[in-house]
Image (tube, rainbow, N blue to C red):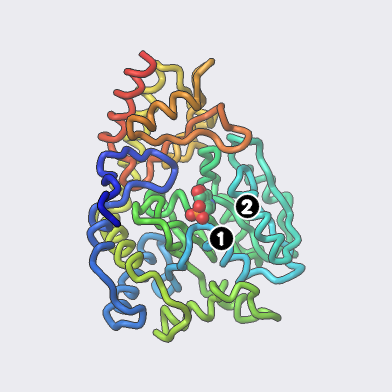
Amino acid sequence: MFDAQPAPLHDHTLLTPGPTPIHPRAMQALARGMLGHMDPEVFALNGEIQADLREMYGTAPETFTALLAGTGSLGMEAGFSNLVESGDEVLVCANGSFGQRMAEMAERYGARVRLVTAPLGEAIRVEDVAARLDGKVKMVAVVHGETSTGVLNPVPAIAELVRGSGALFTVDSVTTAGMEPFRMQEWGVDYTYTGSQKCLSAPPGVAPIAVSDRAFARFAARRTPPPLWYADLGGLRDYWVNRSYHHTVPVNLHFAFHAALRAALDEGLGARQARVKQVGQAVVDTLAPLGFTPYVKRPEDRLPTVLALRLPEGFDDAGVRAALRRREISVTGGLGPTAGVIWRLGLMGESARPAPYLRLMAALEDLLG
Ligand code: PLP
């Protein structure tokens, strides 16, 4: 019997690098009820989502955009499964866990991977990409914001190299799209994806993608069908452009995503970029006296949406985070080699606001002071 409702989470302060707190407009939209995935109203809403995604990504007017029914990793996987064929040379920039995930996926789809790496906490060096790039490379792939270390990679400078090389350019914009400048057309990006639960503060479960005409031409010239049926670009185009059935899309997540993206565009992309910077700087300044210091050395390499802070000497990472969690505040530690060394504070979407951070500061003062 359902006699006890789980407690509502309004009072939970979620400061992780994703998922982020759900935007109130998305929460409302989620509860609208259900329509069929082939309903004319859903197709009309999908059309609005596609147009809004073009604005968010800064694409050409006719660029194909869509939502995949899955998280950011499906966005990543769809790029390799559709645009890489067995034996293709793919240059992957990997300076953290998500760059490594890209390399692993590319390999699973048969690519011969050329890795460009950088030490943890440092950005990929454009000269290193130039040294490994030649006419044989079919795709260059890079993570814009490396969530595992809080590093912003120099995508516009890498884009300049890739343009004219003949390679497709894939950019993971999971922690950047909607909150950091992203100019798909101007930079010459061919494929990008994010996750709904990051900078847009929608529930997890859909991955917004954008695909250039060049990428579609590469897809059309494949020798073999893409091995991942579910995210086949042809099938996706059938649903999103020709309005014919491919698979049942998560309609409620489309409602919520539509509302969250509209809220972001209503606020203005520029205003959001300014908000992240302002709140992030205030957090750095406030935590400095407690001994937290930026993990990424060069200021220009710091990812504004995921603040990586080195913990003070002798800090009880697990103990403090558990104490915060008992007070309904979630923060995230390092990943792999940075576990116990850093905290990663999310400044994406609704988490990039003063109120939740003031709550964290008050709790920390209480626990440490
Ligand atoms: N790429 C980056 C940069 C990420 O931060 C993440 C998740 O944190 C992913 C890809 C994978 O996304 P998801 O966990 O939504 O599958």
SS at mark 2 in the image = helix
Tell whether label 1 touches label 2 (CB within 8 Å).
Answer: yes
Circle 2 sits on which residue?
A: 101
Question: In the image, is the residue at mark 2 within 8 Å of ligand 1 by its beta carbon?
Answer: yes
Q: Is residue 247 left or right of residue 110?
A: left
Residue at 50%, 27% (x, y): give it: 318
Which residue type carries mark 2? Arg
Question: In the image, is the residue at mark 1 within 8 Å of ligand 1 by its beta carbon?
Answer: yes
Asked if residue 210 is positioned above or below residue 248 in the image, the reply reads above
Q: Residue furthest top?
A: 369
Mark 1: few, some, or many residues within 10 Å (few <14, many ≥20)?
many
Examine the rendering and report whether any part of residue 183 can be seen.
Answer: yes
State the image coordinates of residue 44 (x, y, percent, origin top left): 29, 78
The label shown at residue 76 is 1
Determine which quarter of the picture holds residue 45: bottom left
The label shown at residue 237 is none
